[in-house]
C-alpha cells in the first residue's frame, strides 16, 4: 500500500477481492477524520492475484494529478494507467 498527501486528503492504494478476482482501488481519507471514500481504478480490468491489483493501484496513485472536493482522484484526460496500444 502506498499513499500520497493532497490538500485535505490522504490517498492510499490497495486492492479488494471480488469473487475469485481482485480490483485495484484508491481510498481517500479526509484530513478531518471523517469516513474514507473508495474509488475503483481500471474498472474495466480485474486481476487474478492481489499483488497485481496492488501494483496497478500504486501505479494509478502515482498518476493522480489532484483530488476533487469529495476526494475523488483526478487523472489526465484519457489516462488508463495501462501500457495499452492507442
Image (cartoon, rainbow, N blue to C red):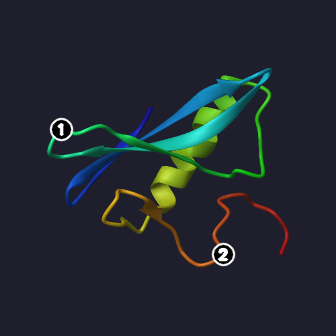
Residue extending farthest to the bottom is 77
Residue plotted at (77% across, 46% down):
45
Image quarter of the N terminus:
top left
Which image quarter: residue 17? Answer: top right
Dot 1 alpha-carbon crowd within 10 angstroms: few under 14, some 14 to 19, many 20 or more: few
Image-based side of 66 in relation to 43, left or right = left
Residue extending farthest to the right is 85
Q: Earlier in the sequence, mark 2 or mark 1?
A: 1
Is residue 8 shown above or below 47?
below
Whole-percent x, y for residue 38 in the image? 47, 42
Which image quarter: residue 37? Answer: top left
Is residue 9 shown above or below 21?
below
Which image quarter: residue 76? Answer: bottom right
Number of numbered discs on residues: 2
Whole-percent x, y for residue 58 in the image? 52, 44
Residue plotted at (41% across, 38% down):
2
Image-based side of 82 in relation to 6, left or right = right
Residue plotted at (36% across, 67% down):
68
Secondary structure, mark 1, is: loop
Q: Which of marks 2 and 1 is in front?
A: 1
Image-based side of 58 in relation to 24, left or right = left
Q: How far apart are marks 2 and 1 (CA)?
A: 32 Å
**Which mark, by number, is residue 33?**
1
Secondary structure, mark 2, is: loop
**Which mark, by number, is residue 17?**
none
Instruction: Name the residue carrying label 2.
Output: 78
Residue plotted at (51% across, 68% down):
75
Amino acid at each position: 500500500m502506498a499513499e500520497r498527501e493532497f490538500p485535505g486528503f490522504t490517498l492510499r492504494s490497495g486492492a479488494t477481492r471480488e469473487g475469485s478476482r481482485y480490483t485495484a482501488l484508491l481510498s481517500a481519507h479526509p484530513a478531518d477524520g471523517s469516513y474514507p471514500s473508495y474509488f475503483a481504478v481500471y474498472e474495466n480490468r480485474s486481476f487474478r492475484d492481489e499483488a497485481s491489483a496492488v501494483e496497478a493501484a500504486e501505479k494509478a496513485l502515482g498518476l493522480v494529478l489532484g483530488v476533487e472536493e469529495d476526494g475523488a482522484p483526478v487523472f489526465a484526460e484519457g489516462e488508463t494507467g495501462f501500457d495499452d496500444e492507442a
